[in-house]
Image (cartoon, rainbow, N blue to C red):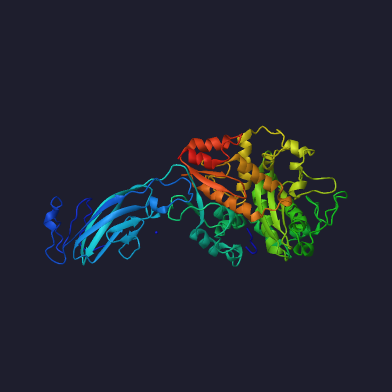
Amino acid sequence: MKRRHLLLGTTGLLTALAGCNISTGNNGDIANPNNTTETTPTNSADISISISTSSQPGQLPPIWRNHNIADFQAQFQVETSGNVESVNVSNEKVQIGPDSDQWNDNTVTVQPGQMTPGEQEFTATASSGSNQAQDTAPAVKPTPGNYKVDVVPERNEVLRNQISQNSLEDNYLEKRGGFITSDPVIDNYSSHKQLEFDKFGIDLAAYEWRHDNDYTELAEAQPTEVKNFVDSIGTDTGNSEIEAIKSGDEVPAAIYPNGSMAERRGGNFDFEQFSNAETVGEALDWVHPYLFNWQAKMTPDGPYSVEDALYAPTLEQAIEENTSQGLEVHAWDVETLGHGTGLMYGKNADGSEELRFMETVASPVTATADDQQLHPLIEDSGYLDPANDGFQEYWHPLRFGWEKDEDTSPLGFEDKKRSAVSAFGGMSNSLHAENNPVPGASDTVAPTTEYVVDFTEKLRNFNQNDIKFETLYNQSKVLEKMVMDEDTNHIIYGKTENPQYAVVADDSLVEGVWEDRSGEYDDFSQQILAGA
């Protein structure tokens, strides 16, 4: 969130015919596979091995509740003859030898996490010098179609490498906790580590780069509107047009704090006041109108609502790079029916947190005769004030599930719900490749109605409740990563204090969750157990 300066090599021939115990010698001749009695040992190099399945694992549980892991293990019997020097049992995931505690006399125990889902084979291999003998035995790991997901910490080396190569900030990961192993998305449900099939790994610290990289990409793609603006702050650019924007000589598109709306006096950009601001709101009072005035003078179109995805990272970077009181900012765009906006989280110098609307047009919904209100606190916004004309004209996603919401838009229930999911899904990644799936528009990830109502309520009342922004942000990261996995259907349920996750096999369950007005699917654990 914080951006301060911004994958059996052997000698001899191998034979792996199931049920046959065959030895190969140095001359490469293959023993008769239909008559294993011909492979009786004649010297120390002649060996044989057999493996048989003695116990198949039971059906793995859809929800782990104090089960005994021994009920879900596979067991094999392994017999060897001849002068065997080494022996192991393996599949594509694991190789077990006699020195393992899973090998007891002739019995080999395999944990469920060492098996792939469904039918598979295990290979027993005996070796003596360059000679090998092999045999195979079947096993089945029966996994449920619907199951609860255990979110686990997992290092994302791809993202970590991108950060080390591209971040504008020193010690980027260290400042975000290094490698996060405890959070509500991780701690609320844990199954046995050996199950494996139900694990969903995420690197919460590194995943912040999915958002923070927005500025890096836009600075290169649209330098005039992004990088040049940020770089102009606190320095004499030598460009008379830019300096005129700062000084207020130009007719303003937005008023600085030392100007006057009534007198149409623009005032001037005071860098000292901006750089020493102790709250994000105070910093925005200076830099937000500067951005609007920059857009009006330096671009052909001026400030307009479709550029909220551009304004969010630009304002975020401008504050974090150019203020001195340790302010932290996280801004993202939110699509509002007919009107672009954004949301902006701020952590102030005293550690307090706040959430604000971010307007991207020069005629904001919340504006008054005395104040343009480019970035009002959530509770002060006209989008959430039934008495404001903007409330009637523009339906905002943070109204989903709110008792004060009115049917002022043509959107139906599911469209409103998807819009709300898009609003908090954008926290973790505002910019998407053209064909990438996005939260809210995805048909493979559906949060329950209870979860969506609770998440939007936490944002709508953020300045009056005790929840930490990081708690919400990390859930947005999990949502966004699940959306990117289009091969798996996911359900998100519970509330933001105890987020729960599930995988379902049936597409109709996903559809049902999206359409659920009555809360039928809110207690989704019951749906999982009912389908087991």
* Residue that protrudes farthest toward the right in the picture: 263
Q: Is residue 66 left or right of residue 89?
A: right
Q: Is residue 363 left or right of residue 135?
A: right
Q: Nearer the viewer, residue 249 or 438?
A: 438
Give the quarter of the figure containing the N terminus: bottom right
Residue 473, given in percent of the width and then of the height, sits at: 62, 53
User: Can the viewer see residue 302?
Assistant: no
Residue 217, given in percent of the width and then of the height, sits at: 58, 55
Q: Is residue 364 left or right of residue 27?
A: right
Dividing the picture into quadrants, the one containing residue 109 is: bottom left
The vertical placement of 522 against 290, above or below, is above
**Number of marks in picture:** 0
Q: Nearer the viewer, residue 221 or 447?
A: 447
Q: Nearer the viewer, residue 244 or 136?
A: 136
Q: Residue at x 36, y 56 (%)?
A: 93
Residue 460, given in percent of the width and then of the height, sits at: 70, 46
User: Can the viewer see residue 527?
Assistant: yes
